[in-house]
Image (cartoon, rainbow, N blue to C red):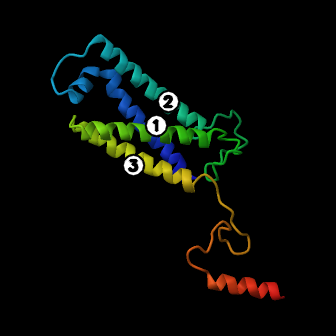
Amino acid sequence: MDVYYYFNYMSAAWMVIEAIPLIVSPTVIITLLSPDVRESTPLETYLSRSLGFTLIAFAILNLLLTGSVPLTSSISEPASHGTSTELSDPTAPYAVPSLCITLTYHIAVAYYCWTQYQAGHALTYSVAVAAHSLFVAVGGWVLLFGASDGHISRKTGADKRTSGFPFKNVEADKKRVGKKSL
């Protein structure tokens, strides 16, 4: 599932982009998010840099646990990037749980930034709302539709899990009735 791996790479890249200013210059972040311009306190600097390092560690762990970066040392078995990301996939045993945790992270940060933006705080929160909302949408799509290959019929090539609700498939019903009478 290519979208799943793109989601992991882009999510990790966004976390690193968020972490770099936190580590390099906490004063700039304080200035952007505070209504008054002032120097950051030692506690704010410590917490800012700790959060930056945590975001980088979270991004790396996400890439490793989802199978986006193969951890095997042998070259004989290629990584199955084009196949499913099921729980039984040996190249990514923690793919779905990592996706759920990353998705929960993006939901929480998007909600927090939205509440801060709505409360009249800095306009810079709107950029974070847009980015994290995009990751929530893509991650939700992957969680709903990209976690398995589905149940594809060998004869027709259609997904067996589909139903006729709320509309009936008259042609399929005719074929099914015709086969039963034989």
Q: Earlier in the sequence, mark 1 or mark 3?
A: 1
**Which callout, 1 or 2, points at the residue further toward the start of the chain?**
2
Q: Which residue is mark 1?
A: 105
Q: Where is residue 92? Give x, y as percent.
A: 65, 41
* Crowding at mark 1 (Cα within 10 Å: few <14, some 14-19, many 20+): some
* Residue 139 seen from this side: yes
**Which circle, 1 or 2, is nearer the viewer?**
1
- Which residue is painted at 69% across and 63% down in the image? 151
Using the image, tell me which numbered label, if any, was put on residue 134.
Answer: 3
Q: Residue furthest left?
A: 36
- Horizontal side, residue 74 vs residue 37: left or right: right
Name the amino acid, label 2: Phe
Q: Nearer the viewer, mark 1 or mark 3?
A: 1
Left or right of 109 in this view: 60: right
Q: Label 3 near label 1: C-beta < 8 Å? A: no
Q: Are marks 3 and 2 in contact (CB under 8 Å)?
A: no
Closer to the chain start, of discs 3 and 2, is: 2
Tell me: residue 49, above or below residue 1: above
Quadrant in which the C terminus appears: bottom right
**Percent of width and height locating residue 125:** 28, 38
Alpha carbon separation for disc pair 3 and 2: 19 Å
